[in-house]
Image (cartoon, rainbow, N blue to C red):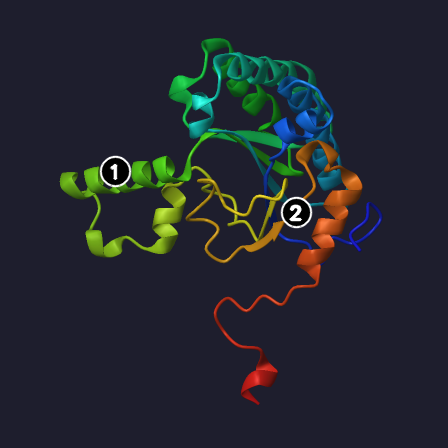
Amino acid sequence: MPRSDASNAGLPRHVAIIMDGNGRWARQRGLPRSAGHVAGVESVRAVVRTAVDIGLANLTLYAFSTENWKRPLIEVNHLMTLFRGYFRKDVRQLRDMNVRMRIIGNRSRAAEDILSMIEEGEKLTEGNTGLNLAFAFDYGAQEEIVAAARNFACAVKEGTVDPESITVESFSKQLQTGGMPDPDFVIRTSGERRLSNFLLFQSAYSEFLFLDTMWPDFRRAEFLAALEHFVARDRRFGTVAPEAVA
């Protein structure tokens, strides 16, 4: 079992989590949706701390999708307030934990103060050498893939890139996760079983785990239990096990 005092051998290089279920968690308790989002921030802290403790190399958390802008304005505003609070309170703690923080997503729609906090947080932690923590904020995989394709199309038109030289590897480098390995393990909480426009290109060979647990209830114990599922799996990447061909 992965534990704080255990070797990180066998752990995924990169875990990506779709943090889902805050609203339903709150509704089940007769609370406003905002209470679920507040509780969800505590789960973020618990999962990040656990990732640091066990020596996980890369963690990506789906914080806000491009589609989330369609939610009621009062909820969007509350989420932005929570983001502001997290960046103000937690980024220095991330620095002290040797965590390097980055944000993936479309930054053109973020409020100026949030964009400034993002840039400040990335700069503050850029020299850290421990956990690489990515928050997918205003992120949509389809938008990301189209942007990468557009960049290549422009380069081909300008004559700086030969179309025959475009490979999976070179395309991957154009994505916002460039520099991080593709996620070995994708976890989604709340019982939903879909990717919801999250890391579509990068998840081609990911292992998936869909849990009924709501995100506010997903803390250290739940994260470690989820990692046990990954460690027990046999990953073949399209091949067959040696004994199958013997």
Point out the residue furthest to the right here: 5
Which quadrant: the C terminus?
bottom right
Residue at 32% x, 55% y: name it: 167
Taking 26 as reference, is 7 left or right? right
Mark 2 vs 1, N-terminal side: 1
Q: Position of residue 244 (x, y in %)?
A: 57, 84
Q: Amino acid at mark 2?
A: Leu
Residue at 59% x, 14% y: name it: 84
What kind of element bears circle 2?
Answer: loop
Q: Which of the pair 185/158 is nearer the observer? A: 185
Q: Which of the pair 195/122 is nearer the observer? A: 195
Q: Position of residue 222 (x, y in %)?
A: 75, 44
Residue at 64% x, 37% y: name it: 129
Q: Is residue 10 visible?
A: no
User: Where does label 1 land, which residue?
Assistant: 150
Q: Count residues near mark 1 (Cα–Cα under 10 Å), then give few for <14, some for 14-19, many for 20+.
A: few
Residue at 61% x, 40% y: name it: 59
Tell me the CA gap for discs 2 and 1. Answer: 36 Å
User: Where does label 2 land, which residue?
Assistant: 211
* Residue 126, image quadrant: top right
Q: Position of residue 39 (x, y in %)?
A: 71, 24
Q: Is residue 32 visible?
A: yes
Q: Amino acid at mark 1?
A: Arg
Location of residue 32 with respect to 7 vertically, above or below: above
Point out the residue furthest to the bottom here: 246
* Residue 174, image quadrant: top left
Q: Position of residue 118 (x, y in %)?
A: 53, 20
- Of badges 2 and 1, the one in the foreground is 2
